[in-house]
């Protein structure tokens, strides 16, 4: 039970430094927030889902360091420096910064917006953990932008995920206090449900849509 880790070796695709980093081997969780932030048992695994180069600050998932992936996920060191000097980057806690940098690296490589949105969403969870609502909002805004793009450009490969992401966009808008947009996105979940196994997402949508109409966030 709890989180377990392992140590692996990596070579940075940006500056070619070799280093070792701790990554997540397994997690357990009990329950989740309404934007799918799992309530992990044991040590918080979030920052260890990503690998950060200790030399240049490049960040990505462990699998992005595989030689076959390097060309899809390159970033010049000048680009990473530019990202790290952005005002928001300077304010973010270390855990959230890893997700922010990885998101920017993915943006630079025009990766699937679904994955970019997920990186920023996880960064927003890191800010929630330290109760920094202002920074959480900044990353939620980025997450919603890319998750929306993923739905609009149909880049979500698994059709089962489409109603889930539409719900998530609605829920992020609700959390950002944009009630009108939340209402629109919650309202279109149903038409994307393809089988009975997805009834749960419809029920969750109805619950959060109700909150959106009747409660202050
Ligand atoms: Zn590096």
Image (cartoon, helix red, strand yellow):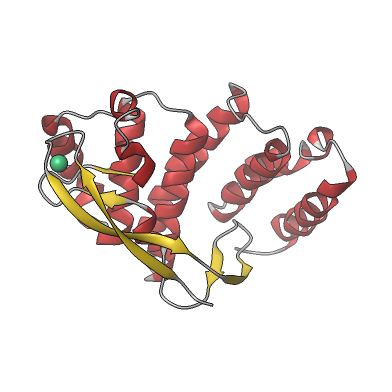
Please give the count of numbered marks on the rendered protein.
Answer: 0
Position above or below: 53 against 146: below
Instruction: Say if residue 16 shows up in the picture.
Output: yes
**In which image quadrant can residue 206 be found?**
bottom right
Residue at the spot x=64%, y=40% of the render? 181
| Displayed quadrant of residue 95 | bottom left
The spot of residue 128 in percent (x, y) is 43, 65
Give whichever of 17, 108 is nearer the camera: 17
Q: Closest to the observer: 171 or 109?
A: 109
Q: Position of residue 199 (x, y in %)?
A: 85, 50
Q: Is residue 33 left or right of residue 57?
A: right
Percent across and percent down for residue 178 are 58, 46
Q: Residue at x 27, y 57 (%)?
A: 92
Quarter of the figure that contains the C terminus: bottom right
Asked if residue 72 lies left or right of residue 18, the reply is right
Residue that appears at 17% across and 46% down? 57
Residue lying furthest right: 196
* Horizontal and vertical percent position of residue 6: 35, 63
**Residue beneath the point at 37% across and 71% down:** 130
Q: Judge whether residue 134 can be spotted in this image.
A: no
């Amino acid at each position: 039970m709890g989180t377990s880790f392992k140590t692996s070796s990596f070579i940075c695709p940006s500056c070619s430094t070799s280093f070792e980093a701790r990554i997540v081997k397994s997690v357990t969780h009990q329950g989740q927030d309404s934007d799918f932030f799992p309530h992990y048992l044991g040590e918080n695994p979030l920052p260890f889902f990503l690998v950060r180069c200790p030399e240049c600050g490049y960040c990505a998932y462990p699998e992005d360091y595989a030689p076959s992936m390097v060309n899809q996920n390159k970033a010049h060191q000048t680009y990473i420096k530019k990202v790290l000097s952005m005002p928001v980057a300077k304010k973010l806690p270390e855990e959230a910064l890893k997700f922010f940098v990885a998101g920017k690296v993915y943006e630079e490589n025009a990766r699937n917006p679904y994955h970019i949105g997920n990186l920023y969403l996880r960064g927003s969870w890191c800010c929630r953990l330290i109760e920094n609502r202002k920074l959480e909002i900044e990353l939620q805004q980025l997450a919603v932008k890319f998750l929306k793009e993923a739905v609009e450009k149909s880049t979500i490969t698994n059709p089962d995920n489409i109603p889930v992401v539409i719900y998530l966009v609605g829920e992020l808008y609700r959390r950002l206090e944009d009630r009108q947009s939340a209402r629109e996105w919650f309202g279109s979940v149903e038409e994307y449900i393809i089988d009975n196994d997805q009834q749960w997402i419809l029920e969750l949508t109805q619950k959060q849509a109700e909150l959106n109409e009747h409660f202050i966030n």
